[in-house]
Image (cartoon, rainbow, N blue to C red):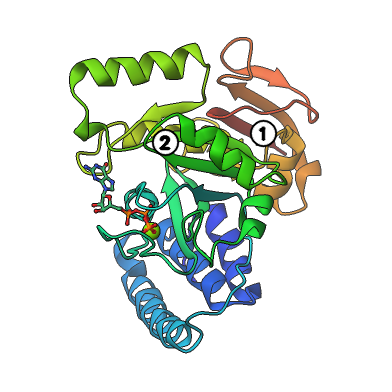
Amino acid sequence: MPINAHPDFFVAEKKYLEAQTLEEKIFYLEEMMRLAPKHKSSEKFNAELKTRLKKLKERSEKASKKSKGKRGIRKEGFQFVLIGFANSGKSSLLAKLTNARPVIAEHAFSTFQPEIGTFEFQGVKAQVIDQPSLGNENFDPGLANNADCLIYVIENFEDIEKIKSKIPRARGKTIIAFNKSDLLDETQKRKVEATIKSKRLNGLLVSTINGENIQELKSKLLHETGLIRVYMKEPGKPASPIPMVMPPESTVKDVAERILKGFSSKVKETRITGPSSKFPNQKVGPTHIVKDLDVVEFHTR
Ligand SMILES: Nc1nc2c(ncn2[C@@H]2O[C@H](COP(=O)(O)OP(=O)(O)OP(=O)(O)O)[C@@H](O)[C@H]2O)c(=O)[nH]1
Ligand SMILES: [Mg+2]
């Protein structure tokens, strides 16, 4: 057990111990490794985590080989689902946004079962699911219906309405990824961008080949999750570089509960600097709602 670990480490460890699936175990173990102290005295511990991860990944690989073709995806946290017609570049985008390495091919319908990737950007993790194209017999509208947010991967604007009509029961928000910008000349690009603007589409012109707007797309996805990153600060010290990720509309009390594990009543005073404060170091009460990128300082007695 490492000493001086970030409080989130223990949260991740608890989730790791409680995890029901290999997927989840891997997810939280990676989180633990990210949050574990990196100093000399914890080298052995970190090496042990690494070995554990390797074993879990081996087991997961074996299991996935066995279950190839099986349906059913466990929803973990915020979920994005990629959707679009054949060859629009969904699998390519999954590979750009996540750690997944799906099959990408010039021929249509190369994806015949859903693939999951873990999106990680600036401290926030989410799931991204790639699936067979619309029109493929293995396309599963259930995934789109349950998604928190759909990423429409398109090559022309007509596809937007066509996609919508295929998934009338989907309720999640949508982001448009107008893909293959590298195939357009400057005038065509300007036109697409002007249309995105004039139609007020929540979207971007991207390319998975040259990486154009991929970082911007990631920022957009992060924004869509609504998850809030707060940086903890101890009095007289700089803020922690690793954010704590909280659900939308979290209050100061929620943050305190998470960090002090049920001992939030110990907090005598809270100071906030950031988007939710009117001025630096503002004193706030427990019902104050935190915003993304706030720095929170608890004074306990
Ligand atoms: N020029 C260009 N080609 C791209 C881009 N993104 C993907 N492609 C190409 O488009 C083809 C299809 O890409 P995939 O990522 O497999 O597309 P998909 O939507 O997953 O297609 P299916 O699953 O087969 O229906 C491949 O040949 C990719 O190399 C891009 O940004 N620019
Ligand atoms: Mg594909």
Crowding near pointer 2: few (<14 within 10 Å), some, many (20+)? many
Kindly indicate the quadrant of the structure image that contains residue 154.
top left
Kindly indicate the quadrant of the structure image that contains residue 300.
top right
Mark 1 belongs to which amino acid? His
Where residue 42 sits in the image (x, y, percent)?
36, 68
Does residue 238 appear in this view?
no
- Mark identifier at residue 177: 2
Q: Quadrant of the C terminus?
A: top right
Where residue 93 sits in the image (x, y, percent)?
36, 48
Q: Nearer the viewer, mark 1 or mark 2?
A: 2
With respect to residue 22, does 184 lie above or below?
A: above
Q: Who's the residue at 29% across and 64% down the image?
A: 40
Q: Who's the residue at 25% across and 57% down the image?
A: 106
Residue topped by disc 1 = 299
**Please, what secondary structure does the residue beneath circle 2 have?**
strand
Q: CA distance from mark 1 to mark 2?
A: 45 Å
Mark 2 belongs to which amino acid? Ala
Mark 1 lies within 8 Å of ligand 1 (Cβ measured): no
Mark 2 lies within 8 Å of ligand 1 (Cβ measured): no
Where residue 76 sits in the image (x, y, percent)?
61, 59
Does residue 167 appear in this view?
yes
